[in-house]
Amino acid sequence: HELTLLCAATGSGKTQLISNIAAQLAIDKITTFVAPVETGSVDLSKRILESIAQTEVNDGLPVPKEKLDLAITKAGLLM
């Protein structure tokens, strides 16, 4: 097992980096745990979906079903 902590200044891209890593790990079907401390789980989930679907979904509105379906298809995930 491995534990990685990522620390950096506000606005330095920590959440984006973790979102991209988590998205790739999901695509590769590697079980991963991310503990969002500042962002919150819903916001982090949306950012991961953005990374997978390459589209904006973190705009404060509910995620449209088409974008969710696209992200799930791209990642090869099933609901």
Image (cartoon, rainbow, N blue to C red):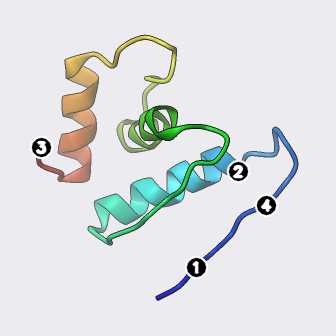
| Residue on which disc 4 sits | 7
- The amino acid on which the numbered mark 4 sits, given as a three-letter code, is Cys
Indicate left or right for 50 with 2 as reference.
left
Q: Earlier in the sequence, mark 4 or mark 2?
A: 4
Residue at the (26%, 51%) spot, across then down = 75
Distance between mark 4 and mark 3 Cα atoms: 32 Å
Left or right: residue 10 versus residue 37 is right
Residue underneath mark 3: 79
4 vs 2, front mark: 4
State the image coordinates of residue 10 (x, y, percent, origin top left).
Answer: 84, 41
Q: Which one is in front in this view, the residue at disc 2 or the one at disc 1?
A: 1
- Where does the C terminus fall, quadrant-wise? top left
Contact flag, marks 4 and 2 (Cβ < 8 Å): yes
Secondary structure under badge 4?
loop
Q: Image quadrant of residue 12?
A: top right
In whole angstroms, how far apart are the C-alphas of marks 3 and 2? 27 Å
Q: Residue at x 58, y 55 (%)?
A: 18
| Residue name at image x 57 percent, y 49 percent | 36
Q: Residue furthest bottom?
A: 1
**Residue indicated by mark 2:** 14
Residue at position x 44%, y 43% from top?
48
